[in-house]
Image: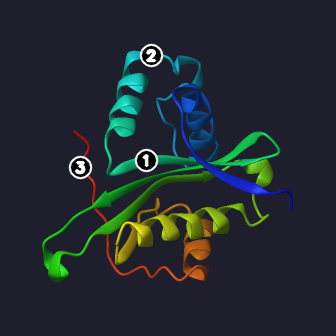
Amino acid sequence: MPELTFRAARREDVRTIIELTLGGAVMTLADDPADWESDEYQTAFAAIEADPNNQIVLGEMEGEVVATMQITFIPGIMRRGMTRALLENIHVRESRRGKGIGSAMIRHAIELAQRRGCRLVQLTSNKKRTEAHRFYGRLGFEPSHEGFKLYL
């Protein structure tokens, strides 16, 4: 496998992040890569980029962005002040799946979490993404909680 490298997302990557996300979505989203320069996307990216507890990490191979994920570091009171890392929007380009990229991305996220002093890495996954659930299980994640969302 060609070398996989990781880097922080830049403003000009927003379109690719949207494309990768839509490629892994199990539901219809109102997002459109063609609108990547819109105020909504740019404001969201600027907020993530400015927040020291948030980052979007991209995986690249042979000059192509092949994966994306967002990591949020959440300080907490319980468990003696435990900080956790929340992984969101984890997607690998469809044509590159099954080649170990997702596993490498998760290992990278775990390393980043450990460097930040996190003692827990958590993620959510759409219930319809059963293949993703098996993948996370193989990496040691346990389906220990039921998640709930309320869209506003």
Which SS class for mark 1? strand
In the picture as drawn, the residue positioned furthest to the left comes out as 77
Amino acid, disc 1: Gln
Would residue 98 appear left or right of 40 to someone viewing this image?
A: right
Q: Residue at x 65, y 69 (%)?
A: 103
Tell me which numbered mark, 2 or 1, is placed earlier along the sequence: 2
Which amino acid is tagged 3?
A: Leu
Eyeballing the image, is 19 above or below 100? Answer: above
Q: Where residue 137 sits: x, y (%)?
A: 55, 80
Report which quarter residue 138 is drawn in: bottom right
Dot 2 falls on a residue whose secondary structure is loop
Question: What amino acid is found at the position of numbered circle 2 in the picture?
Answer: Ser
Q: Which mark is residue 38?
A: 2
- The disc placed on residue 55 is 1
Mark 3 or 1, which is nearer the eye? 1
Question: Which residue in the structure is indicated by mark 3?
Answer: 150
Q: Nearer the viewer, mark 2 or mark 1?
A: 1
Q: Secondary structure at mark 3?
A: loop
The quadrant of the image that shows the N terminus is bottom right
Left or right: 78 in relation to 102: left
Q: CA distance from mark 3 to mark 2?
A: 25 Å
